Amino acid sequence: MADAQLGTAGPLPGAESEDVELYHPHSWLTKYVFSQDAKIIAIQYASTALAIGLVALVLSWLVRLQLGFPGAISFIGPKEYYQLITMHGMIMVIYLLTALFLGGFGNYLIPLMLGARDMVFPYVNMLSYWIYLLAVLVLVASFFAPGGPTGAGWTLYPPQAILSGTPGQEWGIVLMLLSLILFIIGFTMGGVNYVVTVLQARAPGMTLMRMPLTIWGIFTATILALLAFPALFVGAVMMLLDRLLGTSFFMPAIVEAGQRLRYNGGSPILFQHLFWFFGHPEVYIVALPAFGIVSDLISTHARKNIFGYRMMVWAIVAIGALSFVVWAHHMYVSGMNPYFGFFFATTTLVIAIPTAIKVYNWVLTLWRGDIHLTLPMLFAIAFIVTFLNGGLTGLFLGNVVVDVPLSDTMFVVAHFHMVMGVAPILVIFGGLYHWYPKVTGRMLDERLGQLHFWATFLGAYAIFFPMHYLGLMGVPRRYFDIEGLSFVTPSVATLNAFISVVALLVGAAQIVFLYNLVRSLTHGAPAGPNPWRATTLEWQTPETPPPHGNWGATPPVVYRWAYDYSVPGAAEDFIPQNQPGRAPGPAPA
Amino acid sequence: MTGFAFRSVAPAETRPSQWRRLSREWSADRQAFGGASWRKAMMWIFLLSDTFVFGCFLLSYMTVRMSTTVPWPNPSEVFALEIGGTKMPLILIAIMTFVLISSSGTMAMAVAFGYRRDRVRTALLMIVTALLGATFVGMQAFEWTKLIHEGVRPWGNPWGADQFGSSFFMITGFHGTHVTIGVILLAVVARKVWRGDFETGRRGFFTSQRGRYENVEILGLYWHFVDLVWVFIFALFYLW
């Protein structure tokens, strides 16, 4: 901004690197609103994501009410139902999970955990948030547009997504595509920051193989996002042209209500390829930060070094690479050459190897550890169980012959909610309980947290475990009303009602969590600089919450890896990364 | 020229191998790319992402071209100009390509003069690059106008598959947008060079950061990338 002055009289020295100087805000507006400080940007990202996530939560309530008690809510007709499931899915995957993991946790933790003063290009980082906010607002606007938001399903498959039978055909789909395009532009601005900060702005002594696994997860996920979002970007641009200009990229010759439309000769399958070339890496864009964070939570709260650190790193990288060659397993029923099905099934199942390495290593880290059942630890353990569960059903769906009968049933819904809905969100909760003391200086309330944890964990199982059985019984997904279908037994209605009641309760528990977040800002117990006695750099800041510039006059120097817990002969059961001296543990490269 | 500097350093046998250097850099602290500044690394990462954008555009175009059942218009006839009574296929595209590739040359010279702190020559060469870029966009506008007059629309054309016009306007439009952004950035940075911002340490209006002559090189990376993409568009859209 034009009013900015840099480093003239600030208490901080400039950044160590000559590349970019720290930006010192001079007014309330540039300090808290148009802030270039990654920590403030992280809080902005996280708050916006949680706010829009709350909207998606309410949408899921309405979906469940319709499924459990058909016709009970008078304003939900088939049209509204499709709008609800579409917006719920899209918001949760893109605007909540992606934004919270990378924009929220990434912005907060990357500079702090690596010993940097800020991101490498704070101004562009700030733009990233404001464009994200704009994307969210455009998305919200579609709720108020004529015809309402799009009801095309979160995969937005053409041709139906832009035909008049689909709700939101007038404005909803246009605003959705615009919002996605904006999101991708905004994300790219943040993404280049995250990647280059990890690669080029680490503290002295911080080698790549000394980085906490949280950073490895976020870093790899950001690279995946930078390479996968372009496919969605291109798909969104082309569908927008199909909708607005009448081009026929994805639209074959088609008859609608007896009228031949002007579309001709396009390829709907092309969109599916573009969408899933983005969509499958997207699963790991959400999962890899969760893997990383959960590794650090387990190690810290079990007072034990992470088992097989190098294997954990390589597993993250391998999963990231493999995630680009599996996308067509989402398209088995779209029709493809059987050899392709064979190829994609094989690559899909190969991912089980690095993933299993990670799960075993988490369990082996817990093995004979000094396990503290703190809230972050509870959520981390819940994640391992849930993720394992969702992963195992993934083996079913990855096989062509098993997938085909299960396609478009509730089994798929149960699978992806377990593996990329509940599992990552459990890590988000664990991470928030873990790092909230650093962000605010206060602890979150323990009793409310216990209530939140048990309601969420047990509730999630009560919701999604029975859903697998619904799927095996042949209950289709995306059906507004399954009453009276000859292939669905009537007892399904009872199970659906049960799931819906639990879903309402689990949703209510999230309101308790949000209340806890707000209340603890002022009423939480003071946390001190390092309440979990953790080794990583963000807990070693001179002040809590960390001030602008993070490190005061002298930035940290790193002497060891992030997992020196319970080192024999050490004075305490943890040795911070910036404590000098030879580390007794395995020497990093 | 800095580009030839490697000839003066030690012979190959005494230098560590490329692989050894790579592994040393990646196992070091602070930086994984020893030679790259933050800004330059960011540009490289962005270009990697942008490569995937153009890659997806071109692959999508090739897919619709192969999957449509209607014949594809012949590019050498569509993109022909009548000059002095003879129909010259692809003549305008050839000139456009020549102009854009030439602008890469002037850009490279601007970068070289920038590192010699030759303020005036750097600024002038950047302006020349920007003018060549603007000429390219101008000729593209002419081509668009001509095709629109002949009846080509995003949703159809008189000669064959509808996807011809769709892909043409989308891909050249997206590339033209990149060139236009490059021209604007060239003008902005050329002004800074001319004014001596990189010597006086004047701060940027938006970012409040001091610029350096390296900014010329970073912008050059973008410009060469846009040129390189054009080569692929030229080969895959006009020559196929």
Image (cartoon, grey):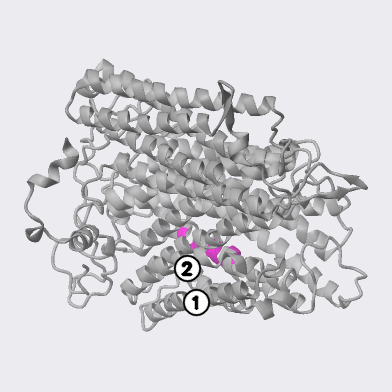
Please state the horizontal and vertical placement of residue B1, each as a whole percent of the image.
16, 35
Chain of the residue on which disc 2 is drawn: A
Give the amino acid type for the residue marked by disc 1 in the picture: Val
Per the image, label 1 sits on a secondary structure element best described as helix
Would you identify the image quadrant in which residue A488 lies?
bottom right
* Badge number at residue A300: none
- In-image side of A39 versus A479 (left or right): left
Question: What residue span does the magenta drawing correspond to?
Answer: A421-431
Q: Residue at x 32, y 21 (%)?
A: B190
- In-image side of A321 versus A564 (left or right): right
Residue furthest toward the bottom?
A: A368
Are dots 2 and 1 in contact, CB under 8 Å? yes
Q: In the image, is residue A446 above or below residue A485?
A: above
Q: In the image, is residue A282 above or below residue A35?
A: below
Give the amino acid type for the residue marked by disc 2 in the picture: Leu
Please state the horizontal and vertical placement of residue B237, each as a whole percent of the image.
55, 43
- State the separation of the CA atoms marked 2 and 1: 8 Å
Quadrant in which the N terminus of chain A is drawn: top left
| Observer-nearest of A166 and A313 | A166
Q: Residue at x 27, y 17 (%)?
A: B194
Residue bearing mark 1: A350
Label 2: few (<14), some (14–19) or many (≥20) C-alpha neighbours in 10 Å: some
Q: Residue at x 92, y 75 (%)?
A: A486
- In-image side of B109 versus B180 (left or right): left
Q: Residue at x 39, y 83 (%)?
A: A367
Chain of the residue on which disc 1 is drawn: A
Residue bearing mark 2: A322
Residue A428 visible in the snapshot:
no
Per the image, label 2 sits on a secondary structure element best described as helix
